[in-house]
Amino acid sequence: MQYLLMIYTSEQQDAQRTPEESEANMGEYFAFTNEAREAGVMMAGDALHPTTAATTVRVRHGQISSTDGPFAETKEQLGGYYLLNCENLDEAIKWAAKIPGARDGSIEIRPVWEFEG
Amino acid sequence: MEAIHQTIERTFREESGRVLAALISTLNDFDLAEDAFQDALIVALEKWPQDGRPTNPGAWITTTARNKAIDRLRRRQNFDRKQAHLVALAQKPPAPDEYEMDSIPDERLKLIFTCCHPALSLEAQVALTLRTLGGLETAEIANAFLVPVPTMAQRLVRAKRKIQQAGIPYRVPPTDLLPERLHAVLTTLYLIFNEGYNASSGDALIRQELSSEAIRLAQILNQLLADDPNLAEDAEALGLLALMLLHDARRQARVGRTGELILLEAQDRSLWDSEQIGVGTAVLHHALSLKQPGPYQIQAAIAALHDQAATPQETDWPQIAALYQALQQYTESPVVRLNWAVAVAMAEGPMRGLALLDELAEAGTLDHYHLFHAARADLLRRAGFYDDAHDAYTIALDLCQNAVEKRFLRRRLAELGHER
């Protein structure tokens, strides 16, 4: 079986960390990643940019609407995900609009952190 | 000295859109471009009073700012990471005597489309457009929208960060996205205009700078669309420009000496800017000749009919009512239906208008809209139902947020007292 492990934290609290605390936190994540990798259970994992970088896409009456922010309604639950490699946000929006769920639900686009070096 | 500094700052503001658009295009970084632009201003304040104003200030600012950006990139600790930029910049070293603006491509369309990307909130689009293309200071934008300066600064920071993090492309959208994106740009410009023309709150009814800025940006947008070999004039973009010009032409007559609101029918029409009405009408005719009808053109046509009437009695209400009816194909806005009902009332009498307003009231969406109650009050007054008019004015007054409009409604209530 494959399992998706979703990480929910408070962005507000995360933002209040000191640089040292952030670094310690990152270290713990790296350790977890390594442990999962060595155990052979790791398929993929990424950190996401905060919700301020999110865009929500919906298709209603054939019209694509993209709005700022993660405005999924509370009556909608996460039902799946795609990880796509796109040129820019416009391309990501175009793909998001093709997902069937965009027609009666919403697709939240979150850019993945790319660590340099 | 003070005067020279003011002239320099004004020049920078005028050139801001074009310079920033070019800088962002090469630097791919809004913040760096803005910082470098400020650096160039400091150099100019030092040098221009001695050396005189360059013959081509826009090119001078762009070249100077680009050099300052290179300095800034060199100073950054993460030098290696940015080296790609430096290489790109160094490949086209600007010769100091080549301050020719023609050699710097006009990238403002890219900037307009990026600032008005639908993945940014509308208020972020407005702030970013005014800051970068309009060259307004953060504090000026904050004042115009009546929010604290730190709030506006934060809004701009967030918008720029979102562009960077979410990967909003800095480009003119491809053909398949263009109509939708152009629509978003027009929405933003119209919002800026309306905030200036019809301030939703606060004391000054007209914040002229915002309206003028929206008109200026719409002029630039239309010019750029016409000049670009890969793009074409857009009837709705022209329609919006015409609409704003035709409304703004009545500005002087719209507010009285003590700042009170004067309705169209009571305005001194000799104060209307006939030259601007001429320009707006010509733009509208050109838009209509492109044969792509749309809501901005219809609204501009309505404004033109008002502008053409020498006296309120000469207003072509039947045609205005027909245009409002046509406008309803494009929008379900209850405000448009309200205006339609008022136009019908003017053409066919207050009782017919009141019947239409009753239908609107049943839908319930306009209950909290002060202009609905004000319009109803006016029709009731015209029909001679003074008590009902009094009640409707009172509701409108309770709901109204704008100090100038409130004064107007109070005056109407007082006048009603005499008629009763």
Image (cartoon, rainbow, N blue to C red):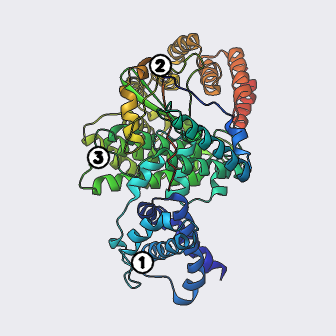
Q: Amino acid at mark 1?
A: Asn
- Residues under numbered marks 1 and 2 in contact, where contact means CB atoms less than 8 Å apart: no
Q: Which residue is mark 3?
A: B286
* Circle 3: element type: helix
Q: Amino acid at mark 2?
A: Met
Q: Is residue B323 visible?
A: no
Q: CA distance from mark 3 to mark 2?
A: 65 Å
Q: Which residue is mark 1?
A: B56
* Circle 2: element type: loop
The residue positioned 60% from the left and 83% from the top of the image is B46
Q: CA distance from mark 1 to mark 2?
A: 67 Å
* Circle 1: element type: loop
Q: Is residue A12 left or right of residue B51?
A: right
| Vertical relation: B294 (above or below) B392 | below
The residue positioned 67% from the left and 33% from the top of the image is A9
- Residues under numbered marks 3 and 2 in contact, where contact means CB atoms less than 8 Å apart: no
Which numbered circle lies on residue A1?
Answer: 2
| Vertical relation: B216 (above or below) A77 | below
Q: Earlier in the sequence, mark 3 or mark 1?
A: 1
- Foreground mark, 1 or 2? 2
Which numbered circle lies on residue B313?
Answer: none
Query: Residue B197 or B346: which is nearer the viewer?
Result: B197
Question: Where does the N terminus of chain B fall, quadrant-wise?
Answer: bottom right
